[in-house]
Amino acid sequence: MHNVLLTGFEAFDQDTLNPSWETVRRLDGTLLSDDVRIVARQLPCAFEQAPERLRQCLADVQPILVIAVGLAQGRSDLSIERVAINLNDARIPDNLGHQPIDTPVVPGGPAAYFCSLPIKAMVRALRAAGIPASVSHSAGTFVCNQVFYSLQHALAGSAVRSGFIHVPWLPQQAAQAGSALPSMALETLVEGLRIAVLTALNTEHDVLETGGQVS
Ligand code: PCA
């Protein structure tokens, strides 16, 4: 059996749940073919712990493909991240109260890594299924970017493809916050992630077209 690793984060900031974990845990154990299944794992929203937990997951699961998923409050679609940068610059403290400012993710590491997934094909497949998606050129500078960078660093030079997707709030989170921030239903997120994984598995060469990026 081959494994696809999906990671999601624990809740952070004011939230009591994180849609990234709610989504990937519903896909845990899903068979994508006779010999490929999804394995979901949770990561802490803590700079000191997340990269090490990710490395443990990679060692345990021995995946053929990895997609890390996180929440981006304010985003309105599935944001397929193209680039991870070697910078921590936290806007708020993490779940352990740490707030690194202008530190590297990996001292001496390259300034950035590109995602190794067929991101444009993923955007195209999601849109064809009626699910809003776009390419994003910034995963931020908080724990999501740290995990994304650590993932690309760990797998650099290997045949295992990997990347990161940011998801919006769930509707109940936007409602509870009394906010006009965008949201997406859990069923849509789950179906979107399933399509993203299948497209990544089945697409060798990315398509050359616009990813509908915002900037
Ligand atoms: N989102 C945060 C960290 C955890 C999460 O789900 C981020 O975008 O960095």
Image (tube, rainbow, N blue to C red):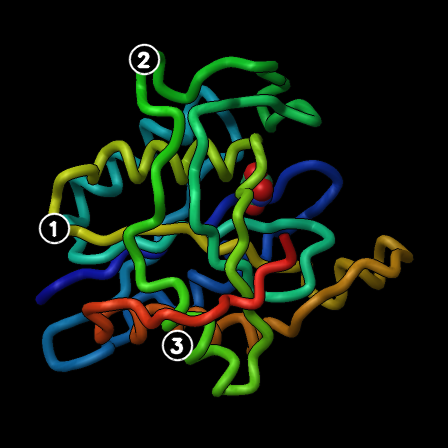
CA gap, disc 1 to disc 2?
23 Å
Q: Which residue is mark 1?
A: 159
- Residue 180 position within the rendered picture, expressed as x and y whole percent measured from the top left: 87, 61
Q: Which residue is mark 2?
A: 108
CA gap, disc 2 to disc 3?
36 Å
Q: Earlier in the sequence, mark 2 or mark 3?
A: 2
CA gap, disc 3 to disc 1?
21 Å
Residue 54 placement, left or right of 148: left
Asked which secondary structure carries label 2, the reply is loop
Q: Nearer the viewer, residue 14 or 131?
A: 131
Q: Could you classify mark 1 by the number of other residues whose Cα lies within 10 Å: few (under 14), some (14-19), or many (20 or more)?
A: few
Q: Quadrant of residue 91?
A: top right
Q: Which residue is mark 3?
A: 195
- Residue 20 position within the rendered picture, expressed as x and y whole percent measured from the top left: 52, 55
The structure residue drawn at horizontal position 44% and vertical position 17%, both measured from the top left corner, is 104
The structure residue drawn at horizontal position 59% and vertical position 50%, both measured from the top left corner, is 71
The vertical placement of 75 against 122, above or below, is above
The vertical placement of 165 against 90, above or below, is below
The structure residue drawn at horizontal position 50% and vertical position 39%, both measured from the top left corner, is 144
Q: Quadrant of ligand 1?
A: top right
Q: Quadrant of residue 146?
A: top left
Q: Could you classify mark 2 by the number of other residues whose Cα lies within 10 Å: few (under 14), some (14-19), or many (20 or more)?
A: few
